[in-house]
Image: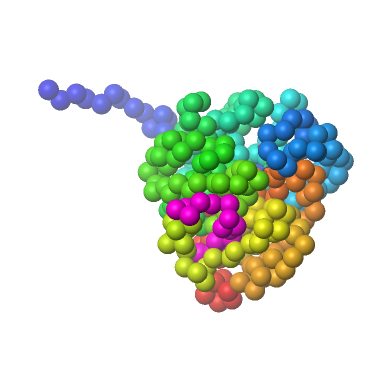
Amino acid sequence: MMTSSPAVTSSVFAPLPHFNRPTFLMCPPEFYDVDYVINPWMAGNLHQPSRDAAFMQWKSLYRQLQKVADVRLLHAREGSPDMVFVAHAAVVQHGLAAVSSFAHPQRQTEEGHLRKWLQDAGFLLWETPRETSFEGEGDALFDANGGHLWAAHGVRTCRHSHRHVADAWHTPVTSLHLVDPRFYHLDLCFAPLSGGYLLYFPEAFDAASLEKIEAAYAAEKRIVVSELEATQFGCNVINVGRNILMGAVETDLAERLTGRGFDVTELALSEFQRGGGSAKSLALRLSDSALGSKVVETDLRTQF
Ligand code: ARG
């Protein structure tokens, strides 16, 4: 016997948020501090960040990002000092948000705030079970075309969450194993860029992961950073089309990126680096990852 599907009205399917411009979410550092140690960068930096300096640095990133993208704001909450690193609370694509299940209780307090914001903004939520930790864009990044998800495990995110998260979009996923506790998140050592480039620190990965990376990105598309650059958060960049926003690095990394056709803006983000993060971790992408690269494909043919 055939079962008839339940009656649905079109109002059940409210349109998902759609963006015509690259759009990000940021969270001001009102309550930011290093209150505990959950990564090696925080050790020795307990209560060291200056709130005033952090605010100035955050505002300059906010202003620079507003030049190339729309930026929405999530209110900071007392008791969630790492909430400023909003990129770790979800991965968003096609109006659907895979929400994080943070590994550490100190960051689990952030989950409800972002969940509510996303829900109110009309995003569909894809939950991840508490027992398989998953830390959003900290450990899962789409390639620039949005067709492939790179996901890391080994420190914060549990490998078993990868397939579950990728199923939110029925997208292929490649798991990468992080082996150096200094690079405890994928966004600290791996950044897919427009134009099919990849910025990465090879030593943060095991040999099997490196093989997968090298099979996907041709040698001329791989921009390798040195250990010094990686420890200055050189991979933790925001990329919108040909624009790259990053914390200042004391080497020629910006010039190497400029040489590939990128417009690089370096910013002082020292107060956030005391907490173990830099530019990328301060902004969650809300629009599709392909939006930024579509802008650049035209540029690429002409100027890159
Ligand atoms: N204190 C935060 C944490 O340990 C910092 C996150 C910033 N980092 C990053 N992976 N980009 O979770």
Residue 48 image position (x, y, % from top left): 84, 38
The magenta region covers 194-209
Residue 254 image position (x, y, % from top left): 70, 66
Say whether residue 202 is magenta.
yes
Query: Which quarter of the rendered picture does the N terminus lie within?
Result: top left
Identify the image quadrant of residue 135: top right
Viewer-side residue, 206 vs 56: 206
Query: Does residue 137 lie above or below 7 as drawn?
Result: below
Residue in the picture at 76% in, 37% down: 43
Q: Quadrant of ligand 1?
A: top right
Residue in the picture at 19% in, 23% down: 3
Residue in the picture at 70% in, 40% down: 40
> Residue pushed farthest bottom?
302
Residue 170 image position (x, y, % from top left): 37, 43
**Number of numbered tags placed on the structure image:** 0
Would you say residue 92 is visible in this rendering?
no
Query: Which quarter of the rendered picture does the C terminus lie within?
Result: bottom right
Say whether residue 103 is magenta.
no
Q: Along the horizontal axis of the image, is 227 left or right of 299?
A: right
**Image color mode:** rainbow
> Residue pushed farthest left?
1
Query: Does residue 17 lie above or below 22 as drawn?
Result: above
Residue in the picture at 71% in, 48% down: 278
Would you say residue 176 is visible in this rendering?
yes
Viewer-side residue, 188 vs 154: 154
Residue 228 image position (x, y, % from top left): 71, 58
Q: Along the horizontal axis of the image, is 107 left or right of 250?
A: left
Identify the image quadrant of residue 11: top left
Query: Does residue 3 lie above or below 157 as drawn?
Result: above
